[in-house]
Amino acid sequence: MVPLKSKYRVAIIGGGVQGLSLAYNLAKLGERDVVVFEKGYIGSGASTRNGGLIRTAWFSQEVCTLMNESVQVWEHLSEELAFNVMYTQRGSFIVAGTEPQMEFCKEMVDLHTSWGIHTRLLDSGEAMKLIPCFNEREVRGGIYDKKGGIARHDAVVWAYARAASHLGVAIFPQTEVQAIHLEDGHVRSVKIPQGEVQADTVVNAAGGHSKHVAQMVGVELPTRPVRWEAMVTEPIKPYLNPYVRWPKGELYVSQTSRGEIVAGVDSHEASSMDLRCSLEFIKRVSAALSSIFPSLGRLALLRQWAGLISISDDGCPILGSIPKVDGFILDCGWYIGFATAPIAGRMLARNILESKMPKLIEPFRYSRFAEGRQISEDSNSEKMTHLARLDAH
Amino acid sequence: MKPKKVVCLCEDLTKEDLEDAVENGFGDLELLKRFTGVCTGPCQGKFCLTNVIQLLSEMKSTRPELISIPALRPPFRPTRLALLAGGAAEEQI
Amino acid sequence: MSCDKTRFARQIYSNEQGRRAENLLRLGKCLKDQRIYDHPYLKFNRERKTHFKFDGNEYDAYEGETVGAALVAAGVKTISRSAKYHRPRGFLCFMGRCPNCMAEVNGVPNVRICREKVSQEMIVRTQNVFLNSRVDLYSVLDKLDFAFPVGFQYKRFIRPRSLWPFYERMIRSVAGIGRLPMQLQGQRAKPFHTRLVEADIAVVGGGPAGISAAIAGAEMGARVALVDEGNQLGGHLRWNTDMVDSRSEFAGMRAFQVAKKLADHAVTFSNISIFAPAIAIGVFSEGILAAESSDGLVEIKPKRYLFATGCTDRLPIFENNDLPGIITKTSAQILMHLYGIKPGNEAAVYCSSDEGFVLASQLLDAAVRVNAVVDERKDASQSKMLDTVVSKDVPIYFNSKVFRASGRNRLNSIETSGEDGQEHEIRCDVLCFAVGRQPVCELAQQAGCELKYDPALESATAIHDEHMRSNLESYVAGEMLGTQPLSMMLLEGRLAGLSAALSLGLGDSARLREQADLTTDVSRNRRS
């Protein structure tokens, strides 16, 4: 364990995949005077509770572009970090079950192409060939993204932590940041149980607790904490290759390299900090799974869990500096935090070192809410779900 | 059959495997679970949790009561999705 | 001081057993029949017969037997292979909690065959093997373990990147246990239902503490929902034949008789709704306790939870402790006393309390030869049960531990070492162990109860106050707190049930006085 110093140039609050990726990328770019404070064990927040899903096919240009860049980093990540993060690109598929949905999918595929994302519209025959366990009656076709994939979330956290440590970053788990002190509108230090630690830059990468951390500097983030549940079945032999999103069932599902089927819902709960598990969740997801994959009904649920994330008003992350407080950088509001960690870490590291926001993450700036420039990711996604309920005939 | 002292029947983990993992920096029970898979298999810790806590306390020279017990999530035993799906499932067993 | 007798009690098979063996020989069937036909206290119902297939071989079963019981009766020891090294595995817990007995039944993967009732023409297959459970070519992985240390996948397969999809396909094909068909071709079967139940008190666990608690609550007018995973109420009492302790109101009776008496009493209450068999799934954030019954989900919304969920037997760690034939005490008792099947022919018992002597005695009653009792305790000077075993000439090794089990694909012998340095090799085909307990406290934790390590139990269990209350809504009682003997489990259960009902505003001053008396009795027992 490295000794704790009294001053660092950059202090990152949150030892999840975003905070650790940022720490690593800062060190890689030459800034090694970095410390990460994590109140639990590393990755104890949403980072090791999510489904580990990565795809480029989203519903807004901003998110699609970001994800596309991220996937290019994912493809080399194991080599870069010298740790196998088990990233596998088995594709992803968004199911369309009605004609209106197919029409919308066709529009999306055209848009994707214009944004440089290479997705393809599949008809029902092609979809059944790709995923033979589908319930044919629910599938008219859909959007196939060959760049979709999954990675093992724990491995990603450990890989970034190890790589960052090797480059000289100090990581302190079980160390909660209790307060942030300002001086003349600039961050000065953070308070941890061991005392005050000075920092020139403080990054809020606190995930589900980022709203609380922002309040330490008097900033109210346009986010709300939301319980996110997931569930996993017993491991079975290969059953499902690509990861699947089924808007009608508001379901996402994938099979890990270990053989477990991981599934969850794609819609946001009401605000909640309750991390207990709900019965409604497993009933709902089991019903959806059994409908879209009938033979899956025979499989048994092994475990369910919950994590905390902070969702912003447009469902997209809030990144970069804020006008009111100098030296305070946001890296939060993530719903897509796992998939974008490799690229977000790189971009934010540049942001911090060059004091300029890279173009790729500029749409996610904090000021977009005041400017009325929210991103349409959520609204388009909801439209796809809504169209699933329309009877084509 | 090679002589093995099995601690985790589900994931086939021996006492040595767990000791190696702790020595490699996965000494927190939560990290040990994730790295080795102990307590995450079909029995969900019913046959190994007590032994793992004992082992960790010995390796870290700490009292077992200081090792936090992880969240023990539902279901108690693996439960068929068709049953949870209730009447919504089409084909039942 | 070790007790080193050299003479053994001779096991004489009954005439009935010999007659059956002759019949079987005449019919050309497998001679092996581990069923008990003559038991000093129990009678087994064997009327209708059925048969099923396991890995292509046909086996007989009597109505009411599970696949697991029928296989043990036929002398089948190896029933599966372990996930990574494909080591042979046999039945361990017989409660559906361990991973050893998962098999494919009529196309459904990962079924716990220890609990799965046999039905006509059932097809059972071992999963994740190359050939079958007895001969699995993947078992070569056990010898190549040096190539697959824990976490090896994080350090390998990184370069060349182009080969990663191939490696991943390989990992996926060896990972996973059961297999699912892509599409179902079967008949439409009856749908599963959901039952919604409102209750004042939900009691989880229908053993002595749970039944006692349910009765206490019901007597005070509470609507009680009692959930138990057994076919009948009674919990561990059902599969025990020992005399209950003299302090109990059932003194003079045997455990299984007490189980029936308690169960019969519970059903007389119209305000106790019994859900058995029903396996609790969990306690959820909606304030619901869900359970899985044979025809669907039961959702109970109680005002109070009461957990009397008992314990699991703790696995002892020694070389080859996963060999087929190494079973829990509970497993041996369920086999002998519920199904009337001998767990083996030559047993050894590994214990750290008088439970070992009780078990040895029960094995002898079932005409199983007991070659040794290995007791971790220094001596048994405090024991009241020692005589039952000493009088039957069973060697007892005190101050000893088992350090190795041997056998090729099934248990043949164990080796023990004592603190005095003495080592013994004991021939046995079944080792029954009772060396510690792990309380079942998942559900209590989900209900918000705090779990704390109990040094006496060497395990964590739920905290509680003197009225058995664990948190605002939850109460706990019984074996899950390490409580012994039966008389105390009954008292604790009663106190918990009474306290839960009082907290709901039910009862009167007489009940309050009873609560005070029970509290004194229970606290006194805990202190001692």
Image: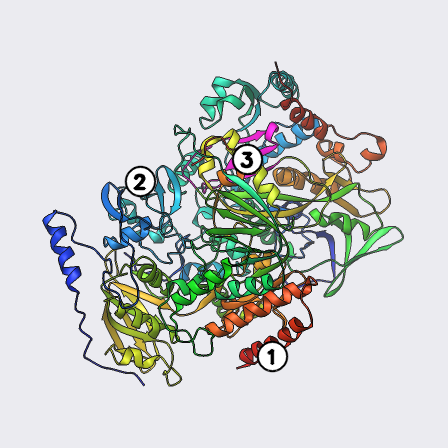
Could you say which disc has been placed on residue C520 in the image? 1
Q: Does the magenta stretch include residue A74?
A: no
Residues rendered magenta in the picture: A236-265
Q: Position of residue B5 (x, y in %)?
A: 36, 62
Residue for badge 2: C122
Q: Nearer the viewer, residue C151 or C430?
A: C430
Which mark is in front, 1 or 2?
1
Q: Distance between the residues labelled 3 and 2?
A: 27 Å
B86 left or right of A215 in image: left
Q: Where is residue C146 in the image (x, y as percent from the top left)?
A: 35, 53
The structure residue drawn at horizontal position 61% and vertical position 56%, both measured from the top left corner, is C223
Residue lying at the far top in this picture: please name it.
A393
Q: Is mark 2 on a helix, strand or loop?
A: strand
Residue lying at the far right in this picture: please name it.
A184
Q: Earlier in the sequence, mark 1 or mark 2?
A: 2
- Residue C58 is drawn in which quadrant? top left
* Residue type at the position of mark 3: Ala
Q: Is mark 3 on a helix, strand or loop?
A: helix
Q: Is mark 1 on a helix, strand or loop?
A: helix
The structure residue drawn at horizontal position 43% and vertical position 33%, both measured from the top left corner, is C189
- Does residue B55 sit above or below C118 in this rendering? below
Residue for badge 3: A287
- Residue C53 is drawn in which quadrant? top left
Mark 2 neighbour density, 10 Å: few (under 14) some (14–19) many (20 or more): some
Which chain does the residue under circle 1 lie in? C
Q: Position of residue C125 (x, y in %)?
A: 31, 42
- Does residue C448 sit above or below C485 in this rendering? above
C173 left or right of B78 in image: left
| Residue C86 in sight from this viewpoint | no
Which chain does the residue under circle 2 lie in? C
